[in-house]
Amino acid sequence: MREWTFDRVLAHADAGESYMWECPDFFSLGDQHYLMFSPQGMNAEGYSYRNRFQSGVIPGMWSPGRLFAQSGHFTELDNGHDFYAPQSFLAKDGRRIVIGWMDMWESPMPSKREGWAGCMTLARELSESNGKLLQRPVHEAESLRQQHQSISPRTISNKYVLQENAQAVEIQLQWALKNSDAEHYGLQLGTGMRLYIDNQSERLVLWRYYPHENLDGYRSIPLPQGDMLALRIFIDTSSVEVFINDGEAVMSSRIYPQPEERELSLYASHGVAVLQHGALWQLG
């Protein structure tokens, strides 16, 4: 944009809420408008806003010549360790697609040593259902699929190895929540990354532990309501992206396993976990 005229402030933060709304984006989905931005200066609240900086949306209504009327509160777009500055565009076929930066300011950035400024997330298609913003990998991501491995239904009480050296893979898992009584169960990559259901806290947890890179800690969301939990997981050399229940929530984090720490397995601790369905693809 080379020429423009200031009209008005679209929206502003309440006193003490944050000190800067960075990388703003404004778009509509159906009759709903969304202001997407990355606020700096928000304080952590329980399980929410645990990263140094956040990225999310405020829903509302807008028409030319009027103020943006907010209809809800700020909601984080991604609940993992590393997601910032998302930007969207409208594809020729009408899809609203968003891509974010998968790293975090003022946090360890191991790939910086190799001359990289983080990495980008998968492109995600945005949609709305019953007032909730959904994010799904664009269907073009399926073109990355190569060798397919079916994971038969099973009851897990210890560990079940999927691959001994997982590099770039897509995994789909469907857990039977009501039939699984393990204290925690899920997917692990080596000893440094786990995506698991915590039955005691009733939360889905993404945990990482890479002391050689000064990275550790977990992010979590409440377990969705219902008997089943569907997970679509993309693991690459140094990243993991998790899409929960067809895009109801997303968790993205950078991971840094040693070369010998890439065994991919399912596990259950102190009880059993029931896997209803599973599939795995090599990506290339």
Image: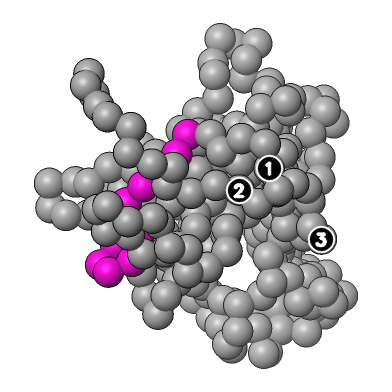
* Closest to the observer, 31 or 213: 31
Query: Foreground: 5 or 275?
Result: 5
Q: Mark 3 is on which residue type?
A: Gly
**Residue 156 placement, left or right of 69:** right
Q: Is residue 12 highlighted in magenta?
A: no
Q: Answer with the quarter of the image where residue 221 lies.
A: bottom right
Q: Position of residue 115 (x, y in %)?
A: 56, 9
Q: Residue at x 32, y 56 (%)?
A: 66
Badge 2 element: loop
* Residue neighbourhood size for the residue with mark 3, other residues' Cα within 10 Å, grouped as few (<14), some (14–19), many (≥20): few
SS type, badge 3: loop
Q: Are marks 2 and 1 in contact (CB under 8 Å)?
A: yes
| Residue matched to label 1 | 18
Which quarter of the figure is the C terminus placed in?
Answer: top left
Q: Which residues are magenta?
A: 23-34
Which mark is nearer the camera, 2 or 3?
A: 2
Residue 16 visible: yes
Residue underneath mark 3: 46
Position of 210 with respect to 4 (left or right) is: right
**Which residue is rendered at x = 78% and y = 25% of the image?**
213
- Residue for badge 2: 13
Residue in the image at 60% along x and 84% along y: 225
Please state which amino acid type lies under the numbered disc 2. Answer: Ala
Residue 116 location (% of width, % of height): 54, 16
